[in-house]
Image (cartoon, grey):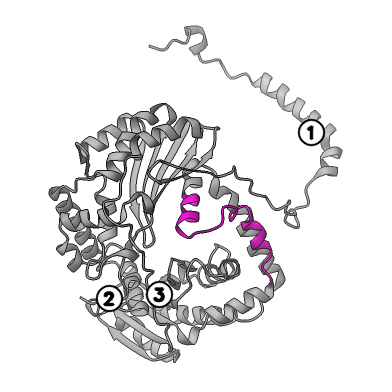
Amino acid sequence: MSAVPEARRTKRPFDYCRVGRVLRALVVVTACAGPTWGQTAPDRTRPPALGPTPQLDLPAIQKRALSNGLAVWLIESHEVPIAQINIVVRAGAGDDPAGKFGAASLTAAMLDEGAGSRSALEIADAVEFLGANLTTTSSFDSSAVRLNVPVTRLGEALPLLADVILRPTFPAMELDRLRQERITALLQARDDPGSIAQMAFARIVFGAMHRYGTGAIGTEATLKTFSTGDLAAFHSAYYQPANAVVVVVGDVTPDAVLPQLEKHFGGWKAAADPPRRAPVPAATQLSRGQIYIVDKPEAEQSQIRIGWVGVPRSTPDYFSLLVLNTVLGGSFTSRLNQNLREQHGYAYGASSGFDMRLSPGPFVAAAGVQSDKTPESLREFDNELLKILEPVPADEITKAKNYIALGFPAEFESSADLSRRLEELIVYQLADEYFERYITNVQAVTAADVQRVAKTYIQPSRFAVVVVGDRKTIEPGIRALNLGPVRVMSVDEALGL
């Protein structure tokens, strides 16, 4: 029953006289305000001028260490009563043992599937009870466990985090489940042209034996070989205090949080000598271009991937490449997207990017296009990749730099965002003030810088072009373009199955 009094819930009759009085009053007010409004009307014939470039002013990173040498990086952020605790480990898919591709990814995924005295379900229940969020993750360059929790529950959450990172039990039943999930995902990927294009491109550019030629989760064959002992061995070798950093961001102070970290992580001891990390060898660069058609009969779209071996995260050309790629394919208004989507309507979207890892990752330009417009799309890709080698107009470079600079501060909005950026500093050994200087470094990029890196890193005549689509529909038109030699492959051949 509503608590609103009956008199207030009674519908009032529509008062036409009252409405008339209001409208007459509005007319008088509008008439009186007319001249003033006309004098201050905005000029809609041109976009408003940009304000000053925003500057990023981050709190200082406070660096400490526990009694066992485990490094702690802390940033205080007291606006919200939340604590973000990440433990980043310098080990990822790039550290997978030979013949064991997928070890790092599967190890990270198993950390919360049983730890200490808790099962996977008990861990999930405990996290939910605390109003927290706990995730495990792994990339080619690192692995991490991330905990987001209300500050009032931090003391209860840290023992759980310590169990997950220090004392995973790797239950055989959970390993079998995750293994089957991943094998199923790989099987399903063979029916998805986009996934096929991604996997085939990596294999073609890097080769079957190179670590970057295979996805981080490994292959069906390697997944079938893993035992709980393999994962425990990887964990023992790499999950060590000398190989990890605790990142703390949120409504905490060193005096409050360090004793708690010492209590739960100060006893973390190395089980073996700290690992000597060997970087993934740089892949041999492509010397000549070739088009690969991967036949996917009846595909409604063609998935296109174009590129070669790119650059490592440590490249001194990072900011010049960032601006270059923003112009080429790194934003909605980039040349590739405007061409293939807005001008021609061949694709829903087109993009490009440098995947920068500890070792040189791929540069790739990509789109899913209409099957009957595949040759035309390839021609437009080629046109844009060649055109970017010419001097880029100053206004286009300014637009790209402003796009980067104006959006950059938004990447630090939450404690989770900030903690992830600190992980980046750790994994790629960047200077503490790197992000404070980021916008300045972007704005310092010149037209000459952009043209130089374009000529160095964009060489279409040497690119691999992978097209996954219906061969009978797309092959004649692709060959007629005469962009380079064409090789036709089955899905199994492209994926090395």
Do we see residue 391 in this rendering? yes
Q: Residue at x 25, y 37 (%)?
A: 123
The reply to whether dot 1 and dot 3 touch (C-beta < 8 Å) is no
Earlier along the polypeptide chain: callout 3 or callout 2?
2
For badge 3, the amino acid type reads: Ile
- The Cα–Cα distance between marks 2 and 1, rounded to whole angstroms, is 65 Å
Q: Which residue is mark 1?
A: 30
Quickly name the residue at label 3: 304
The tag on residue 227 is: none
Queried whether the magenta region covers residue 431, the answer comes back as: yes
Q: Using the numbered discs, state the Cα–Cα distance from disc 1 to disc 3 in whole angstroms.
A: 57 Å
Secondary structure beneath dot 1 equals: helix
Viewer-nearest residue: 455 or 193: 455
> Can you tell which of label 2 and label 1 is closer to the viewer?
2
Mark 1 or 3: the one toward you = 3
Span colored in magenta: 420-446
Amino acid type assigned to the residue bearing label 1 in the image? Thr
Quarter holding residue 169: top left
Q: Which residue is mark 2?
A: 296
